[in-house]
Image (cartoon, rainbow, N blue to C red):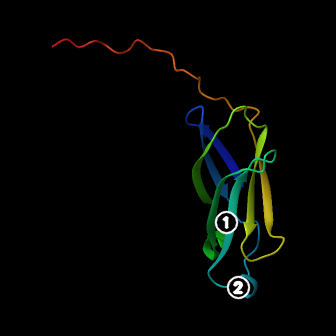
Amino acid sequence: IETQLQPITRTVLRIKLTITAAFKWSDKIHGTTNQQFWIWIEDPDTDNIYHSEYFIITKKQVKLEEPQIIIFTIPIIEPLANQYYVRAISDRWLGSDTTTIISFHNLILPERHMPHTGNFKRIII
């Protein structure tokens, strides 16, 4: 799982996950269509879950190593935590899970109050 972060405002964070299956497909084991997973974003300090989603990876995506992209927003709560976890867990298989760390050490949030640019002109009619 690869992550990209984009602060929308000081209180909203856009997260883009690029998910590529890390297993070889076998019709005998996995069936002929798809595999189902759950993914969520978790604060390890408070155990709060900020987003959860059910998603499906198809046989074609696994065979062609096509990534699946999931985009969503979550709230940012200050003071900002050091990190969040992205957890992906199979809906069918025990022990088939992964955890990715989202670090906030280099995350730059927008200013609290955007400065006035002075670009607005007064229109007189």
Element at badge 1?
Answer: loop
Position of 3 relative to 63 (above/below): above
Q: Give percent across and percent down for residue 96.
A: 80, 70
Q: Is 111 displayed left or right of 98 in the figure?
A: left
Q: Give percent across and percent down for residue 3.
A: 68, 48
Circles 1, 2 touching at the beta carbon (< 8 Å)? no
Q: Residue at x 76, y 84 (%)?
A: 29
Foreground disc of the pair 1, 2:
2
Q: Residue at x 64, y 84 (%)?
A: 32
Q: How dense is the environment of label 1, judged by Cα within 10 Å: few (below 14), some, or many (20 and up)?
A: some
Q: Give percent across and percent down for residue 53.
A: 62, 61
The amino acid beneath tag 2 is Asp
Position of 31 relative to 67 (above/below): below
Element at badge 2?
Answer: helix
Nearer-N-terminus badge (1/2): 2
The amino acid beneath tag 1 is Glu
Q: Residue at x 59, y 27 (%)?
A: 110
Q: Using the rendered view, name the quadrant where residue 63 is placed.
A: bottom right
Of the 4 image quadrants, the one containing the N terminus is bottom right
Name the residue that disc number 1 marks: 65
Of the 4 image quadrants, the one containing the C terminus is top left
Q: Residue at x 30, y 13 (%)?
A: 121
In this rendering, the count of numbered labels is 2
Name the residue that disc number 2 marks: 27
Q: Give percent across and percent down for residue 93.
A: 78, 76
